[in-house]
Image: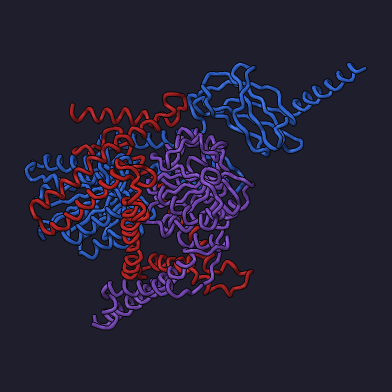
Chain colours: A blue, B purple, C red
């Protein structure tokens, strides 16, 4: 009798745990579009809310280790702890109370982590890259074949020659500020590209150019650019290596230094071309007060209004990136600008068509772009 | 030269003096203008208020001393709210000077919450270079990204970090940013890649560039913009501080600028007409 | 060869980074992160270059007794003092060569580096930033003119946002009943920021993004070589 009773109790306990686990479906699958370092777990638990959910993992189906304790209301998790691609992993979940007693647990499930060769979530990006690149390459090739490409006037860039001439007549220097970001910022590169053209003109007119920089890497690059410019024009002797100098990495220390240079040296023209933050208006107003011609260009949307208000000419957004192509007048580079315009037209059409379709309840374009 | 022509060519030092007086007086004599709470700030407050008991939150101090007057008040307000709700606060910085900003913010809050204990209720993990890359690493493994805290204590010895393996272990993240790296990077990685709710505070001038992230996908749950955002949050937590005091000065400064613009336009039109008659 | 080699490296690395954005599989998955880390390491070493240049330029000007040479002494002395006290006594919880400097901490209330940082540098930075308030006033006075329709619209929205973003806006329109809340200046300012300016911002961001793509392609393909110092 006693044995029957013990057997019934054990049967009840075993049966209830089996009954409980079979009621909690747990699925494990490889996390998509990754390097094989994550596995997704999802489950559906309908019972008394536990205190915590314990996630246990094993690599052989036997030796389970606790890898995480998560909040009781969660129904999915991505396990990214030391998952190696190509390995099989076994999981089980335990739903525990405040005393760490197991209220319920799931069956053991397994999944193999795999690295994908293509991130399908970035398909819209790939499509845009291909279309844009194709348009750019097409126009570059067209330009090389001699096709004339119309590019509208950019007033700020047409004034560069005039500004350099004015500085030479007045015997005053020019000041070029390539922004406060480092060489990994494309706006800094765009600014330095323009510096190359400007430095050639300065070398040709035998004027003086100051280039205070905020980052050491920009210092090396800017020095080489200006030196090469003087070399190309045949005036290597006129190059002063101290005309390109480092001030400080600190934002407001840099702007204090540049303001001091503007107030003391009273340049005839100042160029602010690159990435700027809050210091833009301080620079522009000080330059305005000194009476210099000011040409600014940045792709920072928050700083453009300050430059527009205080400077004579402002290159807005993409005009900064187009400047180098515009100044070089080379077919290759102008073709690139035309290709960008095709991209812009495409985006406009996509936005317009997308809005109409969304209003009609057809979310194809929205879902595609959001990868839903 | 007529009066308006003189006015159009006024020495800008007079404008500076008027601004100085206009900003200084409200700082001495409180005007106590009423403040209306805007929706982006309410959303940040809601995110902090409605989190689970014992929630783990990450505060990222991505600004320096130059923007401290604008951003520090909102950091202090969020810290106060978090400690009031008994959350576990983990602080980090993507800017080198952010570490000091964090220390100073916590020092000022400790007077009001003397019982909070370092390592149990809050921790300062310090600065890590790398911006987007660092946030990505944090998303995978916090301990590898921050093996020690700002005072070089091993993370394994800090009890608050016991349950933190990566960014997904946080209930939400609040970034205080005045540039790059900052809130944009937090949104791009922490929210878009790891699905962690992100809210933030920024300088007023950054608000236009961050507001596209206040969308139906809640890339940014809410945003405290500039001193006004900080003042609104102080009002919501019923703990007026430097931001509320500063708003009077900001209001007067804005009013003065509007008056200058009006005078400038009146002068512009009057002198324009006057010149046309002379011709 | 001297000019071709950097172009080849640029092309190779550029194409590799673009391709790695679409391939999660190793070694492509972490390529961008790795290259970014390399850049940070290199720029860390490059900081020394900048500091040496700063010292060189200032010392030469002092040596030659150029115009205002006394002010360059201030720069050099500040630089040397900060580096020295940072190395000797460290900052915050980090010890220096001479330990934590307890005697100095008890005298100043904090370490010398932190003291100068908090009471000199922080205040100087905030002062430079606060110049914006004054310059904003003078720039607005000069630039905000209702010359034509566009500038008039800009002027009106600027005034509405400036009022709405402050307590004066609430004070001016607080009396408007609740069912007409949308006429409150803060709500109007919010509307302008949420719908009107966001549209413009997005347009600028899209165009700037396209500009970045074009500029980057030109650099990767070797069409743009100005950053190397020539055609």
Residue at left 29%, top 46%? C86
Front residue of A37 and B207? A37
Residue placed farthest to the left in the image? A237
Give how far across and how far down residue B83 sits, in percent: 57, 52
**Count of picture labels:** 0
Q: In the drawing, does residue B55 fall left or right of residue C211?
A: right
Image quadrant containing the N terminus of chain A: top right
Give the x, y percent position of residue C199: 46, 54
**Is A39 rendered above or below residue C130?**
above
Q: Nearer the viewer, residue B241 or C96?
A: C96
Dividing the picture into quadrants, the one containing residue B66 is bottom left
Q: Residue at x 56, y 52 (%)?
A: B115
The residue lying toward the viewer, choosing from A170 and A334, is: A170
User: In the rendered image of this protein, does residue A284 appear above or below residue A93?
Assistant: below
Answer with left or right where residue C64 lies relative to residue C3. Answer: left
Q: Is residue B256 left or right of residue A189?
A: right
Q: Can residue C202 be seen?
A: no
Q: Is residue B201 above or below residue A144?
A: below
What residue occupies the far right of the structure in this picture?
A1
């Amino acid at each position: 009798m006693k044995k029957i009773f013990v057997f019934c109790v054990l049967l009840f306990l075993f049966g209830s745990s089996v009954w409980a686990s079979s009621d909690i479906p747990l699925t494990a699958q490889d996390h998509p579009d990754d390097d094989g370092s994550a596995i997704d777990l999802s489950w559906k638990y309908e019972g008394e809310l536990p205190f915590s959910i314990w996630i246990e993992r094993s690599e052989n189906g036997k030796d389970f280790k606790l890898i995480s304790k998560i909040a009781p209301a969660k129904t999915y998790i991505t396990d990214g702890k030391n998952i190696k691609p190509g390995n099989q992993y076994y999981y089980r979940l335990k739903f525990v109370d405040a005393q760490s007693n197991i209220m319920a647990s799931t069956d053991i499930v397994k999944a193999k982590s795999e690295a994908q060769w293509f991130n399908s979530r970035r398909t819209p990006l790939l499509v845009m890259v291909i279309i844009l690149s194709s348009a750019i390459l097409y126009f570059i090739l067209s330009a090389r074949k001699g096709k004339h490409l119309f590019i509208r006037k950019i007033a700020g860039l047409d004034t560069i020659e005039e500004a350099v001439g004015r500085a030479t007549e007045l015997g005053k220097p020019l000041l070029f500020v390539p922004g406060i970001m480092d060489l990994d910022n494309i706006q800094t590169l765009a600014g330095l590209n323009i510096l190359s053209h400007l430095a050639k003109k300065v070398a040709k007119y035998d004027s003086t150019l100051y280039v205070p920089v905020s980052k050491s890497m920009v210092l090396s690059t800017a020095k080489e650019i200006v030196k090469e410019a003087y070399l190309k024009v045949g005036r290597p002797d006129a190059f002063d290596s101290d005309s390109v100098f480092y001030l400080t990495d600190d934002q407001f220390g840099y702007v204090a230094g540049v303001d001091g240079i503007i107030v003391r040296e009273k340049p005839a023209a100042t160029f602010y071309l690159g990435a700027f933050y809050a210091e833009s208006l301080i620079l522009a107003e000080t330059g305005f007060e000194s009476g210099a011609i000011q040409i600014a260009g940045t792709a920072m949307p928050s700083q453009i209004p300050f430059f527009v208000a205080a400077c004579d000419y402002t290159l807005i957004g993409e005009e900064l990136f187009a400047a180098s192509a515009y100044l070089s007048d080379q077919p290759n580079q102008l073709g690139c600008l035309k290709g960008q315009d095709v991209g812009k037209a495409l985006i406009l059409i996509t936005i317009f068509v997308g809005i109409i379709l969304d209003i009609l309840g057809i979310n194809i374009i929205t879902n595609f772009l959001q990868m839903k | 030269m007529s009066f308006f022509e003189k006015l159009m060519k006024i020495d800008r030092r007079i404008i500076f003096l008027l601004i100085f007086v206009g900003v200084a007086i409200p700082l001495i004599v409180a005007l106590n203008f009423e403040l209306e709470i805007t929706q982006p700030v309410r959303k940040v407050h809601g995110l902090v208020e409605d989190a689970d008991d014992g929630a783990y939150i990450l505060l990222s101090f991505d600004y320096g001393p130059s923007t401290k007057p604008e951003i520090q008040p909102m950091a202090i307000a969020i810290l106060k709210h978090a400690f009031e709700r008994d959350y576990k606060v983990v602080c980090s910085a993507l800017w080198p000077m952010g570490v000091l900003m964090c220390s100073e913010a916590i020092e000022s809050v400790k007077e009001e919450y003397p019982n909070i204990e370092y390592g149990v209720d809050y921790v300062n993990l310090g600065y890590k270079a790398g911006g987007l890359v660092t946030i990505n690493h944090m998303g995978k493994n916090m301990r590898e990204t921050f093996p020690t805290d700002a005072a070089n204590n091993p993370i394994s010895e800090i009890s608050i970090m016991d349950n933190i393996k990566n960014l997904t272990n946080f209930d939400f993240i609040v970034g205080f940013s005045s540039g790059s790296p900052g809130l944009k990077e937090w949104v791009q990685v922490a929210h878009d890649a790891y699905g962690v709710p992100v809210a933030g505070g920024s300088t007023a001038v950054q608000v236009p560039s961050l507001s596209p992230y206040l969308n139906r996908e809640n890339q940014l749950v809410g945003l405290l913009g500039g001193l006004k955002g900080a003042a609104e949050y102080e009002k919501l937590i019923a703990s007026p501080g430097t931001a509320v005091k500063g708003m009077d000065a900001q209001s007067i400064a804005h009013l003065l600028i509007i008056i200058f613009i009006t005078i400038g336009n009146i002068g512009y039109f009057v002198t324009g007409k006057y010149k046309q008659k002379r011709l | 060869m001297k000019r071709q080699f950097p172009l080849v490296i640029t092309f190779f690395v550029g194409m590799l980074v673009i391709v790695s954005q679409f391939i999660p599989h190793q070694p492509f998955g972490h390529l961008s992160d790795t290259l970014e880390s390399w850049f940070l390491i290199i720029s860390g070493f490059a900081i020394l270059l900048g500091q040496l240049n700063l010292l060189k330029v200032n010392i030469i000007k002092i040596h030659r007794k150029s115009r205002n040479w006394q002010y360059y002494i201030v720069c050099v002395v500040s630089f040397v003092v900060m580096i020295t006290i940072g190395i000797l006594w460290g900052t915050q919880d980090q010890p220096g060569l001479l330990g934590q400097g307890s005697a100095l901490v008890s005298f100043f209330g904090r370490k010398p580096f932190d003291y100068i940082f908090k009471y000199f540098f922080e205040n100087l930075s905030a002062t430079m930033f606060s110049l914006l308030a004054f310059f904003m006033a003078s720039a607005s006075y000069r630039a905000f003119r209702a010359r034509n329709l566009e500038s008039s619209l800009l002027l009106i929205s600027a005034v509405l946002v400036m009022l709405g973003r402050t307590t004066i806006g609430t004070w001016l329109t607080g009396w408007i009943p609740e069912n007409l809340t949308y006429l409150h200046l803060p709500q109007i300012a919010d509307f302008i920021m949420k719908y009107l300016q966001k549209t413009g911002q997005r347009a600028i961001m899209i165009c700037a993004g396209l500009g970045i793509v074009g500029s980057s392609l030109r650099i990767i393909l070797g069409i743009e070589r100005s950053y190397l110092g020539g055609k």
